[in-house]
Image: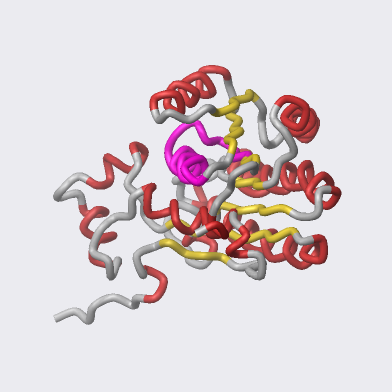
Amino acid sequence: MKRFELEGKVAFITGASYGIGFAIAKALADVGATIVFNDINKELVNKGMLSYEEAGIKAHGYVADVTKEDQMLQLVKKVQLEVGNIDILVNNAGIIKRVPMIEMSAKDFRSVIDIDLTGPFIVSKAVIPSMIKNGGGKIINICSMMSELGRETVSAYAAAKGGLKMLTKNIASEYGEYNIQCNGIGPGYIATPQTAPLRKEGVPFNDFIISKTPAKRWGTPEDLAGPAIFLASSASDFVNGHILYVDGGILAYIGKQPK
C-alpha cells in the first residue's frame, strides 16, 4: 500500500547502532527510507554500520551526543548537505539506571533525564525548522510503559519517559499546524540482548513479565516495525500527540485473581 511507503524519505534514528533503534531503522529501510543514525562514539557507530551492511542497508552513521546542542545542530546541517533533508526523526537514544531512589545520586538522576528527555528536546529542536520549511515531517519519540507506570528502582527513567510523553503532546500542539506529526511508541518488555539475563527460564522477573502480559510472551524488536512504519508514513497524517503502546496488553491488564 503506497501510503505506507517511504521512498525518497530520509529517516534519522538516534542511538540506532543496535537494539530497538536498529530494528526500527531496518523497518523504515524495508519500505524505502534512507537511514541516518548517530551514536555517542566511533566504536558504536562502526558496530552499527557493520550490522546495517549485513542487513543489506546502506546507512549513514555519525558520531554525536544527543545532549550537546551544538553537536546536534552541526550534525543536522551535515546530514542535510550529505544525505538530504530529514523527513522523519526517531528519538530513540536513551539509558536506564536501576537504583532505588533514596540511593540514587542527583548526578545520576540528571544524567538519565539529560539523555532520555533533554536529548529528544535538543534533536527535535534541531530538525523542526527544516521540517517547517519543507512543508511537514514526522517525529517519533520512543517512550515507555514507564510513561504511565512506576516501578521499583526506575525513578529517573519513569520521570524522563513521563516527561517525554508530555513533550510529544506539546510538539504536536505547537507544530501540528505546520503538518508536523509528533507521536510516541511505548514499547513493553522487549527481547533484546540487554534483557537476555532477565529472560532466562526460572528467573523470577521473566515469570513475572509473562504472567502480567496477556500475550504471554516478551515482545520482539520486530513487533515495533509496523507501528514505526505507520507513524513515519502518510498513513498517520491525522494522528498527532498519540502514544502507541506496543506492550502485548500489559497496560490493559490488572492480572489474574490469586487462587
* Residue 176: % across, % down: 77, 65
- Farthest front residue in view: 2
Q: Is residue 115 left or right of residue 151?
A: right
Residue 90 visible to an observer of this rendering: yes
* Residue 5: % across, % down: 55, 52
Tell me if residue 174 comes above or below residue 85 in the rendering: below
Q: Residue at x 34, y 77 (%)?
A: 254
Question: What colour scheme does the image use?
Answer: secondary structure
User: Magenta residues?
Assistant: 12-31
| Residue 69 within the magenta-colored segment of the rendering | no
| Residue 25 within the magenta-colored segment of the rendering | yes
Nearer the observer, 134 or 212: 134
Among the 4 quarters of the image, the one containing residue 252: bottom left
* Residue 222: % across, % down: 37, 49
Q: Is residue 116 left or right of residue 215?
A: right
* Residue 168: % across, % down: 67, 60
Tell me if residue 6 comes above or below residue 177 in the rendering: above
Residue 155 visible to an observer of this rendering: no
Q: Residue at x 56, y 65 (%)?
A: 243
Tell me if residue 61 comes above or below residue 229 in the rendering: above
Q: Is residue 251 left or right of residue 166?
A: left
Q: Residue at x 47, y 64 (%)?
A: 245
- Point out the image quarter for the C terminus: bottom left
Q: Residue at x 28, y 40 (%)?
A: 196
Nearer the observer, 72 or 87: 87
Q: Main secondary structure of the magenta part?
A: helix
